[in-house]
Amino acid sequence: MTISPTHEQLLRLVTSGSLFFFLHDNARTWFHLSDESLEMSGPLIFRWDWNEGPDDRPGLMPVIQIIENAQTGFHVEGPKPEVGRLSALYSALRERLSPARVLCRHEDSWALTSRDSAAEPC
């Protein structure tokens, strides 16, 4: 029997889990959050039409695609995973992956950084 993670566990994963970015099979950038045995990942869509702030920084739209817990065997896939209070998780995820926190200027373009995005913005 699999046990789904609680909202508090998922919220803690989003706000303080280890973050990194990687290229998925189709060369799309994905985010990955991990905290103990709980993991969350999905595509990170760059929205150039969501220009944020006084610069040309694009907007970012994270999509939760996979949530899994190796200890309990929980595994769910899809952009609308069956977990409680999904809208609150998305709000926290958009804050954690906000362009001001994960996009830094590198030469003449924007580069993703997986440094502690809970720290000071780029």
Image: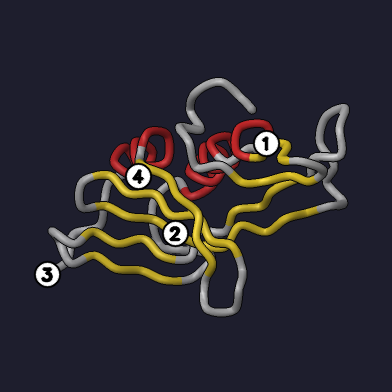
Q: Is residue 83 left or right of residue 89?
A: left
Quadrant containing the N terminus is bottom left
The disc, 1 or 2, on the residue closer to the chain's N-terminal end is: 2
Residue drawn at x 54%, y 46% is 90
CA separation in Å, label 4 and label 1:
27 Å
Q: Earlier in the sequence, mark 3 or mark 1?
A: 3
Crowd band around label 1 with a 10 angstrom C-alpha radius: few (<14), some (14–19), many (20+): some
Q: Secondary structure under badge 4? A: helix
Location of the C terminus (image quadrant): top right
Up the image or down, 116 lies above or below 74; here it is above
Tag shown at residue 41: 2
Which residue is depicted at the point 72% across and 55% down? 46
Residue flagged by tag 2: what amino acid is it? Ser
Q: Quadrant of residue 8?
A: top left
Residue 51 picture quarter: top right
Relative image position of residue 60 (x, y in whole percent): 69, 48
Q: Secondary structure at mark 1?
A: strand
Q: Which residue corresponds to mark 4? A: 10
Marks 4, 1: nearer the viewer: 1
Q: Provide the residue designation for mark 1.
A: 104
